[in-house]
Image (tube, coloured by chain):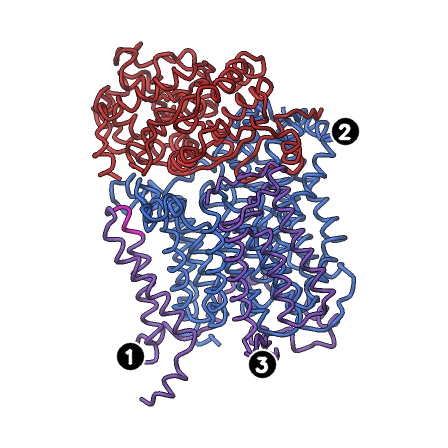
Chain colours: A purple, B blue, C red
Amino acid sequence: MNLSTLKERVTAEHALLLFFLVVSLFFLIESRHLSDRAAAFPQFTAAATLVGTLLLLFRSYLPWPLTVFVQEQEGVFEDTVDDEMLEEIEEKAEQEAREAVEEEHEDEEGDTDDETDDQSAEVEVRYVSVMGYEIHGALFTVMATVGFIVLGYLVGLLWAAPVFVAGYLYALERPKRDIVILAVLSFMVAFSFLAIIGLDIDGGMLFDPQLFTVLGTDLPMGWLP
Amino acid sequence: MGFAAFAEGIGMIASGTTFFWLIGGVLLGIIIGALPGLGPSLGMAILLPLTAPMEAGDAIILLVSIYSGAMYGGAISAILLNAPGTAAAAATTFEGYPMSRKGDALHALAISATASATAGFMTIIVIILLMPVLVDIVLAFGSPEYFLIAFLGLAMITVIAKGSILKGLTAGMFGLMITTVGTSPMAVQPRYAYTDYFDFTLTQGIDFVAVLIGLFAIAEMFNLAGEKGGISRTGTVISGSVIPGVKTVFKYPVNLVKSAFIGLGVGAIPGAGSTVSTFVAYGESLRSSKNPEEFGQGSERGLIAAESSNNGTIGGSLVPTLSFGIPGSAATAVLLGGLIMHGLNPGPLLFSDELATTYSLYLALFIGNILILTVGLLFITRMSFITRVNAIYIIPMIIVFAVIGAYAIRGGQQVWLDVVTVLALGIIGYYMKKYDYSIIAFVLGVVLGSIAEENLDRSLQLSEGSWMIFFHPIDQPLSFGLVIVIILLLFGPFVKSAINKYRGNGD
Amino acid sequence: MVRTNRRTFLKTGVVATAGATMMAGCLGDDDDLTVTVPFGEGGGTDTFAREVIGAADEFYDGSISFENEPGEGGLVGTQEVYNSEPDGSRVVVFNPPSTPTSWLVQEPGFDISEMTGVSIMGFFGYMIYTNSDYEVEDMDDLVDRFEDGEFSQIAGQGQGTMVDVVSRVLRDDVGLPWETYIAYDGGGDVTEAVMGDEVSVGIGTDTGAEAGVADGRLDPVVGLVSDGSGVFPDMATFDEQGYGEPGDPIDILSQLQVSVWAPPGTDRDDIDPLAEAIEEATETDEVQQFAEDSGNVIQYGGPDDADALLADVLETVPQVVDLDEIRADA
């Protein structure tokens, strides 16, 4: 097999399956320390996950009878209707409802039916440019979220929230006014968690000013660094 | 005895302050329920200590109103942001969020409020009438039945999951597997918890609310970040009327009534009930639909089923809680704590001497539903504007909400575990959705894992290892019946289509 | 009517209320106290602690707030308080012998015997109840039926918990020959299982069985605490039925003493004000009324009583129960 075609064939789906594979193997192996009763369920579920994952990973190479299970099937239940009379009434109603909806959204007809999951066809992919690199919007958001959580762990989520929001919007080149408004808003959201339910988010590993101990929130969560 | 107590119940509600607490409770509940990470149990827990100086009747009506408001409120964020606050609201995201993406958020919110309140009215009336009988029905369910109900929920994977059945089953099994982290329900043994390294952090397992927030809300934010525009993908300005939504609900009377009572019936079963009920109703709605392909794409029927069963569950879940002090969910457990704190011990007394209090409680739910309908149609529907805001602004705000919400879920040693769960499941959920792995199946696995395991183990212990405890038609008629339902559900469609083909009238 | 008092500072789990928190802050001083309940909201211990310590707030200088930190039979919350500063600002409520027994079984990395006793507030006890269809009369009758093979199973809360230990002592020490212990999640689930006749015999608290007995679906058979039961004053106890003496292991193990504990090394001066406030609280009408309504027994004990109780329990339990067997069964 040519190396470049292999590269094309390996997608994020394989990474997902590999993740399932590794985790289920881990659960299976580690269950050997457990007593029989405690181990039965994890072993069963891990084994089932493992088998399913392996079938999916090697589905293109499966012998014929097994391919039935991995086929994408839809409409298996098409002719399974029981209460036919009642259904007919509802069917009629459905028809009417659909018509009513269609009337409402005349100008977006065809969009409402069955293509909604097929996003790539109609939706533009967003790229974010960070220091000269073009990054896929989803990847950028994942990285920003990781940064937010790490910062929150170090100095407290209360302070990390506005930094995260401002940084995120700045990277996406939003107007300054919007950045300021939303950063303040996010701080207020975080602060309300602190003030209303006494969440201990005003300090972290590096920095714990205990500014709001006056609010009686010193370690109400009981979480000790 | 009934009528006098009923009249007294009305009197209790109508007295000045009680009515005020009822309204305040429902409104507060809606807000709490709509915030990701906060749900009815946390909402009631916040308020529980504050009720200490209140009169018992007022306090309990306040708590019940919060419960009911929060169960409805969960639908709002489920529809608008794909962020369910409770397992029950997860079914709402399946149809509600796709509707938002199509630009029909207002329509979805109107359906949700109407279906929710209507189901509430119907189920509460039936409960008030059937109260004494329900207690016996509840007691007829035991460990084997709980296991089978959980299994029924899992069997729904084959009905609900789109795409390949193998992908659905693998996702479901993976969900079941991760519920085994933490202390084994049957033993004092930690599993995959590594207490030497993490102290007790992992012994409580992975929290399913964190899983829900990650799989739905965070995964969706990652997804939105990769595309331009708002949540609603149509530029259409939606008309300001909620009437079509209201009308829609009544166009499917069978679906509405059936789902409401599935919610009531399944919700009344302690243990699995209140978690599975919306999935069962949703699955049944899908199964009996002539257009199952519409499900998952913003089906009105599916949304009605999810929302009406969700509200039906509230009334149902109160039956075992009030009659025997057996809470079926975290929320009813906190409610039970409130009852006891105010000297109202659950038990048959609540259905004889204290019947008026019980009636007033259900009446409060009834009136609460009027409020849900009004607020839901007049104000909540206006929140659909959120779906038209550029997603760039929504994404970081929801991530802030979700992460801090996750931090708040359990507190204690698990705070960062829950935060990491939300992030990790967000990433996994993003890819699962992208490659058509059923997230619903995964959620069902996570939600039902420990219920299934524990009751399976206990059933086999009760029967000394004999599987007949699930099949014996005479000794275990209820189990037997459930097994038949599950078999029909799993194999019925294939058999039926095979028969039709054999007869030559299949399409 | 709504009356505001400082009891409204109660905190539940991770949550406190805005107003309450703010006010606590304004009044805040060095005497502020956080009470950790290492069990879930609304449970027996939680309700008990909130009621009695809540009433003690009136006699205490600082403000008192609550948090719930459930898990591992109370060990999670207890360990947390164990690790906190011994300055009198944090205490934990658990019920010897329950949590100490979980500690003995699970052997976590801290030494519960070092906890400083503050006070004992009262107790609740275990009992045996049966499904009323079987019309079990007393302990003799019950033992006979187990010997005849009519019954073989007994239901109780969680494997490795206090009820599990009590059931083993019943079998090995008292002579109730059950064969299988069926474990349920909570006390409510046990009564439900017995009412629905999934298992015919159950062990649980008297308060938990109250509803089922009132309904006629459960029969109280024997009280396992020689002091008797606040809920069923007429129920004959094990010693009255000729199955032992007061002070037997079963007596000590079946009586859950709701008590307050401070971190190791807490100074007596930091403990006494709270102990005194609790003592005054137990005498108030409010707490007495609570005891009457709920069937819990209020009985005050000071710091020394608490210390003695813990030492006693930690010594007795390993003698009467085979801890290795419990771990192996798990």
State how far apart marks 1 and 3 are (Cα).
Answer: 33 Å
Q: Position of residue C223 (x, y in %)?
A: 36, 17
Q: What amino acid type is highlighted by mark number 2?
A: Gly
Above or below: residue B381 compared with residue B237: above
The front one of C214 and C164 is: C164
Q: Which mark is residue B490?
A: none
Determine whether the residue tagged by mark 3 lies in a helix, strand or loop: loop
Q: What amino acid type is highlighted by mark number 3?
A: Ala
Q: Earlier in the sequence, mark 1 or mark 3?
A: 1
Q: What amino acid type is highlighted by mark number 1?
A: Pro
Viewer-nearest of discs 1 and 2: 2
The front one of B395 and B148 is: B395
The front one of B500 and B401 is: B401
The residue identified by callout 3 is A121
Q: Residue at x 25, y 40 (%)?
A: B464
Q: Which residues are magenta?
A: A37-41
State how far apart marks 1 and 2 are (Cα).
Answer: 74 Å
Q: Position of residue B504 (x, y in %)?
A: 44, 76
The residue identified by callout 2 is B16
The front one of B240 and A183 is: A183
Pointer 1 indicates a residue of which chain? Answer: A
Determine whether the residue tagged by mark 2 lies in a helix, strand or loop: helix
Magenta stretch encompasses residue C164 = no
Q: Position of residue A35 (x, y in %)?
A: 24, 46
Viewer-nearest of discs 1 and 3: 3
Q: Contact (CB < 8 A) between labels 2 and 3?
A: no
The residue identified by callout 1 is A63
State how far apart marks 2 and 3 are (Cα).
Answer: 59 Å
